[in-house]
Image (spheres, grey):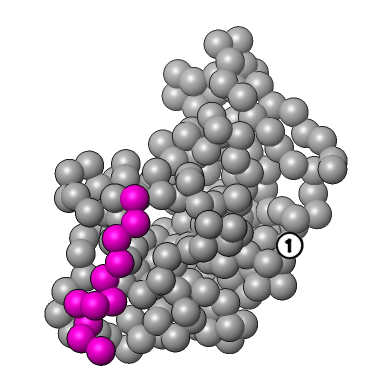
């Protein structure tokens, strides 16, 4: 099949491979730098996703091959976010992603790519886990809509992650901790006890 026939359009995004299904539960692993301990927690979370019933969404990073290997091992779909349209020949990593029955997803327009990718994450991900340096703006948006946001314990050396911790974001060793701990629901509040920048948040923890 000619590779151009693999490009599929969906709600302002293109996909090389396959889009997540409407009812497909997804975990977003935000991978960004970090040491060996962080990499181990990232891989463990990717491995645990299959047993928990989550497909995996991941941003483009130097840790992508590790996540792809974990998804291949568990036969779990992996969706990779790209800030640009993928052209040219495919690498071994590309074929690994295709082999998971996932694909590469990128915005139709090049303008404001960062916001468009974050919008995709927020619309498709039930859980967001930050590995390495966290994205404060994505975390704020996720907290505003009541999404479950977590930080890997081995990533707390980064200042952004410390801000999230002070804002009440739960810390986990890997995905399995997030599934069995009380959920953290945050809501925007001018009088909020926890703050990220000039944004205040109130936080409730409860079990269900």
184 and 116: which is toward the camera: 116
Question: Is 192 above or below relative to 120?
Answer: above
Total marks drawn?
A: 1
Q: Position of residue 60 (x, y in %)?
A: 35, 64
Taking the image as shown, residue 79 lies to the left or right of residue 187, namely left
Quadrant hosting residue 172: bottom right
The outermost residue toward the top is 191
Say which residue appears at 48% left-offset and 33% top-offset: 140
Q: Position of residue 105 (x, y in %)?
A: 34, 63
Quadrant hosting residue 119: top left
Taking the image as shown, residue 94 lies to the left or right of residue 102, namely left
| Residue 2 is covered by the magenta coloring | yes
Q: Position of residue 133 (x, y in %)?
A: 45, 51
Say which residue appears at 30% left-offset and 67% top-offset: 8
Residue at which label 1 appears: 176
Q: Quadrant of the C terminus?
A: top right
The outermost residue toward the right is 207
Residue 183 shows up from this direction:
yes
| Residue 129 is covered by the magenta coloring | no
Q: Judge the density around disc 1: few (<14), some (14-19), many (≥20) Cα neighbours within 10 Å.
A: some
Secondary structure of the residue carrying numbered label 1? helix
Q: Quadrant of the N terminus?
A: bottom left
Say which residue appears at 55% left-offset and 11% top-offset: 190
Q: Position of residue 205 (x, y in %)?
A: 78, 33
Question: Is 145 above or below relative to 63?
Answer: above
- For the record, the magenta segment spans 1-11
Taking the image as shown, residue 174 lies to the left or right of residue 158, namely right
Say which residue appears at 60% left-offset and 44% top-offset: 149
86 and 45: which is toward the camera: 86
47 and 9: which is toward the camera: 9
Residue 159 shows up from this direction:
no
């Amino acid at each position: 099949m000619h590779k151009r026939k693999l490009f599929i359009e969906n709600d302002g995004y293109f996909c090389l491979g396959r889009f997540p299904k409407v009812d497909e539960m997804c975990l977003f692993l935000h991978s960004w730098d970090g040491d060996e301990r962080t990499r181990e927690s990232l891989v463990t979370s990717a491995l645990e996703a299959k047993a928990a019933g989550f497909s995996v969404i991941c941003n483009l990073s130097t840790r992508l091959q590790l996540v792809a290997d974990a998804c291949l091992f568990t036969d779990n779909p992996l969706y990779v976010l790209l800030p640009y349209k993928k052209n040219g020949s495919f690498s071994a990593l590309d074929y690994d992603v295709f082999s998971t029955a996932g694909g590469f997803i990128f915005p139709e327009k090049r303008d404001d790519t960062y916001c468009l990718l974050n919008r995709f994450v927020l619309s498709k991900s039930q859980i967001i886990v930050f590995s390495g340096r966290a994205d404060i703006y994505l975390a704020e948006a996720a907290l505003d809509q009541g999404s479950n946001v977590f930080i890997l314990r081995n990533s707390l050396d980064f200042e952004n992650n410390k801000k999230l911790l002070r804002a009440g974001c739960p810390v986990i060793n890997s995905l399995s901790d997030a599934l069995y701990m009380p959920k953290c629901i945050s809501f925007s509040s001018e009088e909020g006890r926890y703050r990220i920048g000039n944004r205040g948040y109130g936080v409730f923890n409860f079990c269900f």
